[in-house]
Amino acid sequence: MLPGKIIAFGLVTIIVYHGLIALLRLALFSLSKWTVTGADNIPADKACILVSNHVHILDPPLVAASLRSRRIRTMAKQELFDLPLIGWVFSAYGAYSVKRSGRDSQALRKSLRLLGDGEALLLFAEGTRSSGGPLRPAHRGAALIALRSGDPVIPVTITGSNIRLPGVFFQWLFGDRPNIHVSFGEPVDLSDLENGSRDAAEATDRIMRRIAALLPEQLKGPYGGERSVDTSPVVAKDLEN
C-alpha cells in the first residue's frame, strides 16, 4: 500500500472508530441501564492488555465505549473479514484477524507489534461467546501475548450484554431496559512467570480467576474459588498439547 493510501486509511479508521463508538454510547444510554466501574485501572498512555469474558458480538465496541480515555484494538475471527461489507467495517474499526483453529503466529506478531507501539489490546481468551452463560475454559493465546510483552493485564467483566434484537427496543418501549455493566479490575500480577507453554497455562488460569472474581457466582464456571496447589490450571483442552 502506498504511503498516501496508508495515511488516508488511517484517517478513515479513526473516523469510523469514533463514529461507531459515539453511536453505540447513544444507544446504550437510550436503550439500557449502562454502568462502568474501574476505568481508572486502565493505564492512560502506555500499552496494556484487556482480557474479558465474551457474552455478545457487540462486546468489543461495548468495552471501547466504556473507555473514554483510550482507543482499543481487538482481534476478530478471520471469517468476519471475508464478508464484503462487514469485513471492511471491522478493518476500518481497527480490528485485526485471528484464525481460531490452532496457533496463529501472524496474529501473535501483530499483537506484539501493536503493544510495542503503546496500544491497548482487547482479547477474549475463551475464544467464543457464552451468550450470558458461565465462563468456559480459556485458550492460552492472551496469556502468551502478556508474558512475551510484559505489559500489564487488566481483567474485564461484562454482564447483561446478551441482548436480543429487536427485542431490546420493545423492552425500552415498556420501560424494562436491560442492565449492562462493564467492570475493569486491577492488573493481574504475572511477574513470577516466564514466557513458556507451562507458565502460559498458569497465567491463563490466573487471569481467568481474576475475571471470575468480578462475576456473579453462577457465571464463574470452572474458575470459581481458589485453585488448590495440586490442581492443574484450567485451559482449553485443544491447546494443552
Image: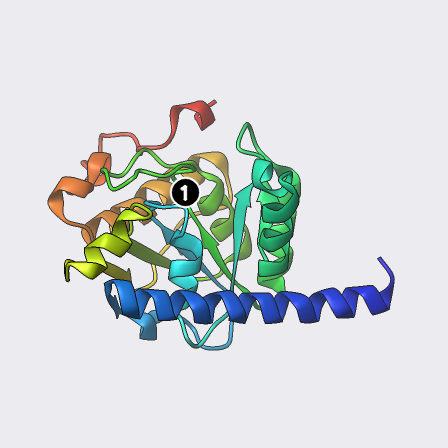
Which residue occupies 63% across, 65% down? 13
Q: Position of residue 44 (x, y in %)?
A: 45, 77
Outermost residue to the right: 2
Residue drawn 15% across the image and 58% down it = 174
Quarter of the view holding residue 200: top left
For the residue pair 50 and 74, the one nearer the viewer reads as: 74
Q: How is the image coloured?
A: rainbow
In the drawing, does residue 28 fall left or right of residue 97? left
Q: Position of residue 176 (x, y in %)?
A: 15, 58
Where residue 57 sits in the image (x, y, percent)? 41, 46
**Tag count in the figure?**
1
Residue 66 seen: no
Tell me the amino acid under the disc marked 1. Answer: Ala
- Quadrant, the N terminus: bottom right
Residue at image point 37% right, 42% down: 204
Residue under the image location 66 percent in, 42 percent down: 106
The residue under label 1 is 125
